[in-house]
Image (spheres, rainbow, N blue to C red):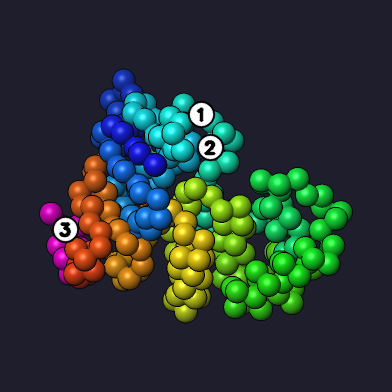
Amino acid sequence: MVVKNLQKVFFPGTENEKHILKNVSLKVYDGDFISVIGNNGAGKSTLLNTIAGTLSADAGEINLEHHNVVKKPVSYRARWMSRVFQDPKMGTAGDLSVAENLVLAQSHTQTISLRRYKKVDQWNRYRKLLKTLNMGLEDRLETQVKYLSGGQRQALSLLMATLSKPKLLLLDEHTAALDPKTSSDVMNITQEIVTREGLTTMMITHKMSDALKYGNRLIMVQDGQIKLDVKGEEKHNLHAEDLVKLFQE
Ligand SMILES: Nc1ncnc2c1ncn2[C@@H]1O[C@H](COP(=O)(O)OP(=O)(O)OP(=O)(O)O)[C@@H](O)[C@H]1O
């Protein structure tokens, strides 16, 4: 994905006019796993929202799979993108069972009927996939999702978001609402799925330790611009204190 000169202005032409994305350009390479950090209000979610299409950009380009999607609706971009939000309830349907949720996620790219999901091969496939999450969900295929814990539900959201192997996975503080142990479990699952499927991923996090530990690349957004963009060895050599200093500049 290539983002070029992306701009977002809230309340244009009024005294409250706010330039939130100031000509942001970013080249995301296939297989990049990017941690996105930055102060509250820096523009991280706005960046993800304009990429996903839930917010329209005021100027700039977003090139995805050789299409400039900047003016395309969310539904058009959704064929290439998946997203997991902070609230585990956002990515799953509480009144449907675990299996039914997986059918819905699969029907994103394939025609599959809710009535036929119990076919044995499908059922076994789901069981196998759920087992990889290590959250005991493989034995709860018929449980309504609203009865799962936040961690189980977020792990399921992650599985659903990645079932159709998106070209871009957007994680918007997806572990922020979880307790430390569950958050760490969900991060490990994230790492495993992203690596196994080779998914290109952008993950907003406020946890410096996660930003440093996970992914091959780290960007810091500050005041609507990309202040830091490091990868590989350079990222590996960064420490939390370096980031804290940058936050204060
Ligand atoms: N729909 C909106 N209308 C007006 N202002 C908005 C809107 N969405 C975000 N903003 C403002 O844009 C700025 C950037 O918000 P954004 O949510 O992108 O920041 P963030 O870096 O994700 O922050 P946080 O870490 O707190 O989630 C903030 O000042 C916010 O108040």
> Residue at point 54% right, 31% down?
73
Quarter holding the C terminus is bottom left
Compared to 155, does 1 lie above or below? above
User: Which image quadrant for residue 18?
Assistant: top left
Which comes before the other along the chain, label 1 or label 2? 1
Label drawn at residue 246: 3
> Residue at point 73% right, 55% down?
103
83 on left or right of 62: right
Instruction: List the residue tagged with mark 1.
Output: 72
Q: Residues within 10 Å of mark 2 (few under 14, many from 20)?
A: some
192 on left or right of 233: right
Is residue 120 at all visible to an observer of this figure?
Answer: yes
In which quadrant of this rendering is ligand 1 seen? top left
User: Which image quadrant for residue 158?
Assistant: bottom right
Residue type at mark 1: give it.
Answer: Lys
- Residue 1: give x, y in percent of width and height: 39, 42
**Boundaries of the magenta span:** 241-249
Instruction: List the residue tagged with mark 2.
Output: 77
235 on left or right of 73: left
> Residue at point 65% right, 71% down?
130
Residue type at mark 3: give it.
Answer: Leu
Which comes before the other along the chain, label 3 or label 1? 1
